[in-house]
Amino acid sequence: MPEIEFPTSAGPTSGYLATPAGGNGPAVVVLQEWWGVEDHIQSVCERLAAEGFLALAPDLYGGETTTQPSEAEQKMMALSMEQVEPQMCGAADFLSTQPGFAGSGVAALGFCLGGGLAVWAAATCPKITAAVTYYYVMPHGKPDFSSVKGPVLGHFGTADEFIKHDEAKALESELSDAGVDVSFHYYEDAGHAFFNETDRLGTHDPQAAQLSWERTLSFLRDALA
């Protein structure tokens, strides 16, 4: 069953686990948007598994999801990094102990809120050695970027109303100035959440989504080889 429970230093945490057909592969922690671990995040895990990755999305909302932006914002703001950080690190630790785990490190991949958390995990979780951030949002401060381990790949739309183009460029510069091996891609006229096929915000961009996915897979294979 995809739904599992794994141990963390903050207590047991549930999550959605997808494994490749062969059972073996490099590992990715998938970090949710502000909606929770819903169909879209589960589908990302399944798509990664189809490409040969072990993929685990820790459920940071304790089983709850929402389709309402106002409720999603409340849930996001109510998160405690003292709870979330060990959940993310615990997910990486769990993946690294699986019989099919291949590779020396684990990647973090996230969207919106999860995009911010992916970089946070790369700065704070010992097992996270690469990160992919889609339209980074991080409302709870930020980690010490100089502690980020491994490369960071970013995907941003130039028409994103939540993360302005200038803000994304500034983030890229800040990471680079901290010594991070960072590469951001900017997708012309794409809006926030352009990768999300549920199109909840009316911003899904199939072309940008496909190109970013191809870049993500290439990055993950190189980073986790």
Image: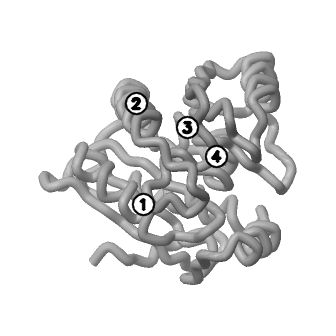
Q: Going from the N terminus, do you reach mark 2 or mark 1 first?
A: 1
- Coloring basis for residues: one colour
x, y (%) of residue 65? 58, 78
Q: Residue at x 50, y 58 (%)?
A: 199
Q: Residues within 10 Å of mark 3 (few under 14, many from 20)?
A: many
Kindly identify which numbered label has been placed on residue 192. Answer: 4
- Indicate the secondary structure of the residue bearing disc 1: strand
Query: Can residue 224 be seen by looking at this rendering?
Result: no
Do the CB atoms of the residues marked 2 and 1 lie less than 8 Å apart?
no
**What kind of residue is marked 4?**
His
Task: Report whether 59 appears left or right of 219.
Answer: right
Kindly identify which numbered label has been placed on residue 131. Answer: 3
Q: Residue at x 79, y 17 (%)?
A: 177
11, above or below 203, in the image? below
Tell me the residue that label 2 is attached to: 211
Kindly identify which numbered label has been placed on residue 56. Answer: 1
Q: CA distance from mark 4 to mark 2?
A: 16 Å
Q: Going from the N terminus, do you reach mark 4 or mark 2 first?
A: 4
